[in-house]
Protein backbone atom coordinates (compact mmCIF):
# COMPACT_ATOMS: atom_id res chain seq x y z
CA UNK A 1 0.00 0.00 0.00
CA UNK A 2 2.84 2.40 0.71
CA UNK A 3 4.04 2.09 -2.90
CA UNK A 4 0.55 2.91 -4.16
CA UNK A 5 0.42 5.90 -1.81
CA UNK A 6 3.80 7.15 -3.05
CA UNK A 7 2.69 6.81 -6.69
CA UNK A 8 -0.58 8.65 -6.03
CA UNK A 9 1.26 11.38 -4.13
CA UNK A 10 3.68 11.78 -7.04
CA UNK A 11 0.85 11.98 -9.58
CA UNK A 12 -0.93 14.63 -7.49
CA UNK A 13 2.29 16.66 -7.44
CA UNK A 14 2.44 16.06 -11.20
CA UNK A 15 -0.92 17.80 -11.51
CA UNK A 16 0.63 20.89 -9.94
CA UNK A 17 3.65 20.54 -12.22
CA UNK A 18 1.25 20.75 -15.17
CA UNK A 19 0.04 24.07 -13.79
CA UNK A 20 3.63 25.37 -13.71
CA UNK A 21 4.39 24.07 -17.22
CA UNK A 22 1.39 25.87 -18.71
CA UNK A 23 1.24 29.04 -16.63
CA UNK A 24 4.85 30.14 -16.21
CA UNK A 25 5.53 30.62 -19.97
CA UNK A 26 2.14 32.35 -20.27
CA UNK A 27 2.91 34.65 -17.33
CA UNK A 28 -0.07 33.45 -15.25
CA UNK A 29 0.11 33.03 -11.48
CA UNK A 30 0.54 29.42 -10.40
CA UNK A 31 -1.56 30.14 -7.30
CA UNK A 32 -4.68 31.76 -8.73
CA UNK A 33 -7.07 31.29 -10.43
CA UNK A 34 -8.12 27.68 -9.86
CA UNK A 35 -7.69 25.12 -12.63
CA UNK A 36 -9.37 26.14 -15.87
CA UNK A 37 -9.66 24.98 -19.46
CA UNK A 38 -6.99 26.71 -21.60
CA UNK A 39 -9.47 26.88 -24.50
CA UNK A 40 -12.76 28.14 -23.02
CA UNK A 41 -11.53 29.33 -19.60
CA UNK A 42 -14.17 27.31 -17.71
CA UNK A 43 -13.32 26.38 -14.13
CA UNK A 44 -12.52 22.68 -13.78
CA UNK A 45 -14.34 21.10 -10.79
CA UNK A 46 -12.33 18.84 -8.50
CA UNK A 47 -14.04 15.65 -9.72
CA UNK A 48 -12.74 16.38 -13.23
CA UNK A 49 -9.28 17.17 -11.91
CA UNK A 50 -8.22 13.74 -10.64
CA UNK A 51 -4.68 12.96 -11.88
CA UNK A 52 -4.55 10.56 -14.85
CA UNK A 53 -8.07 9.19 -14.25
CA UNK A 54 -9.97 12.35 -15.23
CA UNK A 55 -8.31 12.48 -18.64
CA UNK A 56 -9.72 9.08 -19.52
CA UNK A 57 -13.07 9.77 -17.83
CA UNK A 58 -13.47 12.81 -20.09
CA UNK A 59 -12.11 10.89 -23.10
CA UNK A 60 -9.41 13.50 -23.51
CA UNK A 61 -11.83 16.43 -23.96
CA UNK A 62 -12.97 19.44 -21.92
CA UNK A 63 -16.27 18.78 -20.11
CA UNK A 64 -17.60 22.17 -21.27
CA UNK A 65 -16.29 23.04 -24.75
CA UNK A 66 -15.27 19.48 -25.71
CA UNK A 67 -11.96 20.75 -27.05
CA UNK A 68 -9.19 18.11 -26.99
CA UNK A 69 -7.03 18.15 -23.86
CA UNK A 70 -3.31 17.85 -24.45
CA UNK A 71 -2.03 14.34 -23.66
CA UNK A 72 0.82 16.12 -21.90
CA UNK A 73 -1.35 16.32 -18.77
CA UNK A 74 -1.65 12.57 -18.06
CA UNK A 75 1.93 12.02 -19.30
CA UNK A 76 3.30 14.49 -16.75
CA UNK A 77 1.12 13.10 -13.96
CA UNK A 78 2.07 9.50 -14.71
CA UNK A 79 5.77 10.39 -15.10
CA UNK A 80 5.75 12.26 -11.81
CA UNK A 81 4.09 9.33 -10.03
CA UNK A 82 6.43 6.76 -11.57
CA UNK A 83 9.60 8.75 -10.89
CA UNK A 84 8.51 9.45 -7.32
CA UNK A 85 8.05 5.71 -6.87
CA UNK A 86 11.47 4.97 -8.41
CA UNK A 87 13.07 7.52 -6.10
CA UNK A 88 11.38 5.89 -3.12
CA UNK A 89 12.59 2.44 -4.27
CA UNK A 90 16.12 3.80 -4.52
CA UNK A 91 16.41 5.78 -1.29
CA UNK A 92 13.49 4.81 0.95
CA UNK A 93 12.24 7.29 3.52
CA UNK A 94 15.58 9.09 3.75
CA UNK A 95 16.66 12.71 3.21
CA UNK A 96 18.04 11.64 -0.18
CA UNK A 97 14.46 10.79 -1.23
CA UNK A 98 13.41 14.42 -0.76
CA UNK A 99 16.68 15.77 -2.19
CA UNK A 100 16.33 13.85 -5.45
CA UNK A 101 12.52 13.93 -5.41
CA UNK A 102 12.56 17.71 -5.68
CA UNK A 103 15.18 17.40 -8.43
CA UNK A 104 12.80 15.07 -10.32
CA UNK A 105 9.94 17.57 -10.16
CA UNK A 106 12.09 20.45 -11.37
CA UNK A 107 13.45 18.31 -14.19
CA UNK A 108 9.92 17.51 -15.36
CA UNK A 109 8.91 21.19 -15.42
CA UNK A 110 12.14 22.37 -17.05
CA UNK A 111 12.03 19.61 -19.68
CA UNK A 112 8.44 20.14 -20.78
CA UNK A 113 8.80 23.92 -20.89
CA UNK A 114 11.96 23.55 -22.97
CA UNK A 115 10.11 21.21 -25.34
CA UNK A 116 7.34 23.74 -25.91
CA UNK A 117 9.24 27.05 -25.78
CA UNK A 118 12.96 26.22 -26.29
CA UNK A 119 13.62 28.11 -23.07
CA UNK A 120 15.15 27.15 -19.73
CA UNK A 121 14.03 29.68 -17.15
CA UNK A 122 16.72 31.03 -14.84
CA UNK A 123 14.26 31.18 -11.95
CA UNK A 124 13.85 27.40 -11.94
CA UNK A 125 17.60 26.86 -11.99
CA UNK A 126 18.08 29.36 -9.14
CA UNK A 127 15.29 27.83 -7.03
CA UNK A 128 16.64 24.32 -7.62
CA UNK A 129 20.23 25.26 -6.84
CA UNK A 130 19.31 27.20 -3.68
CA UNK A 131 17.16 24.29 -2.51
CA UNK A 132 20.03 21.86 -3.12
CA UNK A 133 22.54 23.98 -1.22
CA UNK A 134 20.27 24.61 1.78
CA UNK A 135 19.06 21.00 1.96
CA UNK A 136 22.63 19.71 1.71
CA UNK A 137 23.76 22.07 4.46
CA UNK A 138 21.16 20.55 6.78
CA UNK A 139 21.19 16.86 5.77
CA UNK A 140 24.60 16.36 4.05
CA UNK A 141 23.23 14.21 1.24
CA UNK A 142 26.25 14.80 -1.01
CA UNK A 143 29.90 15.51 -0.06
CA UNK A 144 30.58 19.18 -0.73
CA UNK A 145 33.75 18.55 -2.73
CA UNK A 146 31.79 16.25 -5.05
CA UNK A 147 28.82 18.63 -5.33
CA UNK A 148 30.85 21.78 -6.02
CA UNK A 149 33.17 19.85 -8.32
CA UNK A 150 30.06 18.73 -10.18
CA UNK A 151 28.97 22.35 -10.66
CA UNK A 152 32.30 23.15 -12.31
CA UNK A 153 32.43 19.93 -14.34
CA UNK A 154 28.84 20.20 -15.58
CA UNK A 155 28.99 23.88 -16.43
CA UNK A 156 32.46 23.95 -18.00
CA UNK A 157 31.91 20.83 -20.12
CA UNK A 158 28.68 22.16 -21.64
CA UNK A 159 30.23 25.61 -22.12
CA UNK A 160 33.04 23.94 -24.05
CA UNK A 161 30.59 22.13 -26.32
CA UNK A 162 28.53 25.30 -26.77
CA UNK A 163 31.60 27.27 -27.90
CA UNK A 164 32.84 24.38 -30.05
CA UNK A 165 29.46 24.10 -31.74
CA UNK A 166 29.42 27.82 -32.42
CA UNK A 167 32.82 27.59 -34.11
CA UNK A 168 31.93 24.51 -36.18
CA UNK A 169 28.39 25.49 -37.22
CA UNK A 170 28.93 29.27 -37.12
CA UNK A 171 25.76 29.72 -35.12
CA UNK A 172 24.54 29.08 -31.61
CA UNK A 173 24.17 25.32 -31.23
CA UNK A 174 23.55 25.25 -27.48
CA UNK A 175 22.07 27.99 -25.33
CA UNK A 176 23.54 29.32 -22.11
CA UNK A 177 20.46 27.94 -20.38
CA UNK A 178 21.76 24.45 -21.12
CA UNK A 179 25.16 25.39 -19.71
CA UNK A 180 23.66 26.67 -16.45
CA UNK A 181 21.39 23.62 -16.36
CA UNK A 182 24.45 21.37 -16.58
CA UNK A 183 26.09 23.20 -13.68
CA UNK A 184 23.03 22.77 -11.45
CA UNK A 185 22.72 19.10 -12.39
CA UNK A 186 26.37 18.70 -11.45
CA UNK A 187 25.62 19.82 -7.90
CA UNK A 188 23.08 17.03 -7.44
CA UNK A 189 25.10 14.30 -9.18
CA UNK A 190 28.65 15.19 -8.20
CA UNK A 191 31.69 15.39 -10.47
CA UNK A 192 32.08 11.62 -10.84
CA UNK A 193 28.65 11.11 -12.38
CA UNK A 194 27.79 14.38 -14.12
CA UNK A 195 30.18 13.94 -17.06
CA UNK A 196 28.87 10.47 -17.89
CA UNK A 197 25.29 11.66 -17.30
CA UNK A 198 25.76 14.48 -19.82
CA UNK A 199 27.41 12.09 -22.26
CA UNK A 200 24.52 9.65 -22.12
CA UNK A 201 22.13 12.59 -22.41
CA UNK A 202 23.76 13.50 -25.74
CA UNK A 203 23.48 9.85 -26.81
CA UNK A 204 19.76 9.92 -26.01
CA UNK A 205 19.42 13.11 -28.08
CA UNK A 206 21.21 11.59 -31.09
CA UNK A 207 19.10 8.42 -30.93
CA UNK A 208 15.91 10.53 -30.76
CA UNK A 209 17.02 12.60 -33.77
CA UNK A 210 17.78 9.46 -35.78
CA UNK A 211 14.32 8.04 -35.01
CA UNK A 212 12.72 11.39 -35.90
CA UNK A 213 14.57 11.46 -39.22
CA UNK A 214 13.51 7.89 -40.03
CA UNK A 215 9.86 8.52 -39.15
CA UNK A 216 9.55 11.95 -40.76
CA UNK A 217 11.83 11.20 -43.70
CA UNK A 218 13.84 14.38 -43.15
CA UNK A 219 16.66 15.66 -41.00
CA UNK A 220 16.05 17.56 -37.79
CA UNK A 221 16.19 21.26 -38.56
CA UNK A 222 16.62 24.12 -36.12
CA UNK A 223 17.22 24.15 -32.38
CA UNK A 224 16.97 20.85 -30.50
CA UNK A 225 15.75 21.28 -26.90
CA UNK A 226 18.41 19.51 -24.85
CA UNK A 227 16.90 19.79 -21.36
CA UNK A 228 14.74 16.62 -21.66
CA UNK A 229 17.72 14.53 -22.79
CA UNK A 230 20.07 15.94 -20.15
CA UNK A 231 17.36 15.33 -17.55
CA UNK A 232 16.88 11.69 -18.59
CA UNK A 233 20.65 11.18 -18.67
CA UNK A 234 20.92 12.62 -15.16
CA UNK A 235 18.08 10.51 -13.78
CA UNK A 236 19.69 7.43 -15.30
CA UNK A 237 22.68 8.07 -13.04
CA UNK A 238 20.58 9.06 -10.02
CA UNK A 239 18.98 5.62 -10.05
CA UNK A 240 21.71 3.41 -11.52
CA UNK A 241 24.88 5.55 -11.37
CA UNK A 242 27.21 3.36 -9.25
CA UNK A 243 26.32 0.22 -11.24
CA UNK A 244 26.85 2.02 -14.57
CA UNK A 245 30.19 3.48 -13.47
CA UNK A 246 31.37 0.04 -12.29
CA UNK A 247 30.32 -1.44 -15.66
CA UNK A 248 32.06 1.39 -17.51
CA UNK A 249 35.40 0.82 -15.83
CA UNK A 250 35.14 -2.95 -16.13
CA UNK A 251 34.33 -2.64 -19.85
CA UNK A 252 36.97 -0.10 -20.82
CA UNK A 253 39.85 -1.05 -18.53
CA UNK A 254 42.02 -3.97 -19.70
CA UNK A 255 41.46 -7.24 -17.88
CA UNK A 256 44.10 -7.80 -15.24
CA UNK A 257 46.04 -11.04 -15.85
Image (cartoon, rainbow, N blue to C red):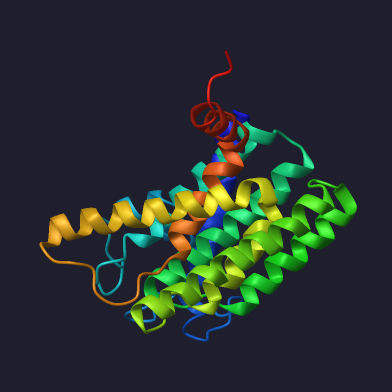
Outermost residue toward the left?
217
Q: In which quarter of the image is the N terminus?
A: top right
Q: Residue at x 30, y 68 (%)?
A: 62
Tell me if residue 54 can be seen: no
Q: Position of residue 245 (x, y in %)?
A: 58, 35
Q: Is residue 82 left or right of residue 193?
A: left
Tell me if residue 162 can be seen: yes
Q: Where is residue 36 in the image (x, y as percent from the top left)?
A: 44, 75
Q: In this view, does 245 lie above or below 71?
A: above
Q: Position of residue 195 (x, y in %)?
A: 58, 52
Q: Residue at x 69, y 73 (%)?
A: 126
Outermost residue toward the bottom?
27
Q: Nearer the viewer, residue 117 or 203?
A: 203
Q: In this view, does 241 lie above or below 175?
A: above
Q: Is residue 72 left or right of residue 251?
A: left
**Among the 4 quarters of the image, the one containing residue 219:** bottom left
Q: Which residue is drawn at 29% across and 77% down?
A: 222
Q: In which quarter of the image is the C terminus?
A: top right
Q: Position of residue 69 (x, y in %)?
A: 30, 66
Q: Residue at x 62, y 46 (%)?
A: 193
Outermost residue toward the right?
138
Q: Is residue 225 above or below residue 136?
A: below
Outermost residue toward the top?
257
Amino acid sequence: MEYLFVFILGSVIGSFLNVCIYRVPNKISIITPNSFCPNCGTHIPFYYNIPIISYFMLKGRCHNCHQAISPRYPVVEFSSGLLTLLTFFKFGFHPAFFFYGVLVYFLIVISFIDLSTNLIYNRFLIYLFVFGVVFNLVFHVRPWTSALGGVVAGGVSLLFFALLGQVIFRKESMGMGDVKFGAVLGFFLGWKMILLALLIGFVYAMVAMVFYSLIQGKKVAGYVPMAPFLAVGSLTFVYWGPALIAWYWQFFLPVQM
